[in-house]
Image (cartoon, rainbow, N blue to C red):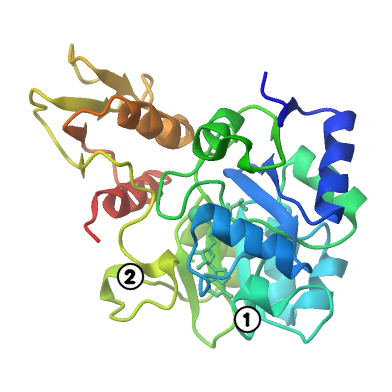
Amino acid sequence: MQNNFLKESSYSINKAVKILNDGGMVALKTETVYGIACDANNIFSIEKVYNLKKRPLFNPLIIHVNDLEMAKKIAVFDELSKKIANYFWPGPLTLILPRKKNILIEDFAVAGLETVALRIPNSVVFQKVLKKFKKPIAAPSANPSGYISSTNAKHVFDSFGRKIELIIDSGKSNFGLESTILNLSKKKLSITRQGIISSDEIKKIVRRKIEISDNSKIKKPISPGQIKRHYAPNTPLKMNVKSPKKGDALLFFGNNHNYKFNPSLNLSKKGDLYEAAQNLFDYLRKLDKLKMKRIAVTPIPLKGIGKTINERLIRASANG
Ligand code: TXA
Ligand code: MG
């Protein structure tokens, strides 16, 4: 096997920590998607990540920490943000908070902003690395900027090969979609990226109104997270297709279809939206590799996590 591709073990975890300390990059599983981890306090390693992903420099990275104690050194927490963090962390929720002046993370990692996006991931391998590294880790999703995210280690290798010092294979990401991003840095609470945790789940805890930022309404995007096209295969993608045609690669959902279409993949035979979310990026990458004329996706129910799946598909099918 490739010499930068190792199964999760105490050996690979120790190696990851050494690479991070030496300013290198390591691909690690999180419960959402795979991330490219680097030392958040080393401008050279941060620069490597931006270059590798071809990510615009104005797009800040999410800072991953091990516990609330480390988080509080980086960001200002009020009662509400403490309550939310205590309830949802570790887990697939990223909080945007006012940033504290600190020596733990470089300005470069957060694009010089006065806010910082923080999360404690609930993934064993990531937690073990954080515990041994003892410092915050900046980690964007492990995909070339704008392309489909990686939900297993092979995806990361397909996208970057040996350009990453180490890829740790810990199997599939549990959820398969990125964390929800909740902006707590303004008076009005807003979700700036839909994800695994829904606004209703958060509302139950905060008992306040939460806006969902509609990316299509933002005229001048402040970050590519707000640019329409994202998560996109190279093959043009069309949503809500009911009758696929010749030249299509079909992506469908549930057992209520009788597609004998070739090529095709079913996101979840039993019609489970969580299973569909976990398979989404993997299947999009698989169908993209076939280099057909179009990837046609049948309607996906707009409920629960299906809303996030639809949001990703809207972005994947957008122009420019
Ligand atoms: O699930 C996840 O969040 C994964 C795993 C690896 O943790 N990470 C991830 O990172 O999705 P990335 O870089 O692909 O997406 C981070 C998003 C970007 O849209 C970025 O613009 C936004 O977070 N972001 C980061 N810091 C921000 C800030 N201070 N204010 C507003 N948006 C911010
Ligand atoms: Mg990403």
Q: Which residue is mark 2?
A: 214
Q: Which residue is mark 1?
A: 115
Secondary structure under badge 1? strand
Above or below, 5 relative to 277 = above
Badge 1: residue crowd in 10 Å (few <14, some 14–19, many ≥20):
many
Above or below, 156 relative to 86 = above
Residue sitting at x 71%, y 49%: 25
**From this viewpoint, is residue 179 visible?**
no
Q: CA distance from mark 1 to mark 2?
A: 20 Å
Image location (x, y in percent) of residue 113: 60, 83
Quadrant position of residue 1: top right
Residue sitting at x 48%, y 60%: 200
Residue sitting at x 83%, y 60%: 67
Which of the pair 272/67 is nearer the observer?
A: 67
Q: From the viewer's perspective, is 62 left or right of 190? A: right
| Residue 32's disc number | none
